[in-house]
Image (cartoon, grey):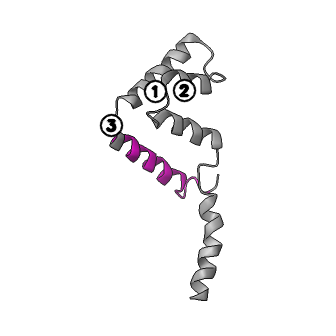
Amino acid sequence: MKLLSVLVLVALPLYCFAGSGCLLLEQVVSKTIDPQVSISECQNFLEDFAQTPEKQQALADLKQRFLNQSDETLKIFGDMMQIMYSSKYCAAY
């Protein structure tokens, strides 16, 4: 039992640091798939990266495509991103 407790305590920090390695990427994905975040909020969050009207429109189109999806589809997409973040290919980052 003590060994199990030690293993859980050792694994906990590794679990807490799991992710893409890029907080900005995780925030962008999170805001994009969150149906509570409006198109304008998403555009404001990414205004440093989309400064032209064409890029702003592309962001609006992308966000609208996610808004058109069901909650189940958005949840599955979020789960898929977490699986990708924790894959062996992202482990180096």
Magenta-tinted stretch: 73-91
Q: In the picture, which quadrant includes the N terminus? A: bottom right
Quarter residue 66 falls in: top left
Question: Is 65 above or below relative to 29?
Answer: above
* Gap between marks 1 and 3 measured at Cα: 13 Å
The residue that appears at 64% across and 49% down in the rendered structure is 21
Residue 47 rendering spot, x and y as whole percentages: 63, 21
Helix, strand, or loop for circle 1? helix
Helix, strand, or loop for circle 2? helix
**Mark 3 = which residue?**
70
Circle 2 Cα neighbour tier, 10 Å, few/some/many (<14 / 14–19 / ≥20)? some
**Mark 1 = which residue?**
63
The residue that appears at 64% across and 55% down in the rendered structure is 92
Q: How many marks?
A: 3
Residue type indicated by callout 1: Lys
Is residue 46 visible to the viewer in this orientation of the structure?
Answer: no
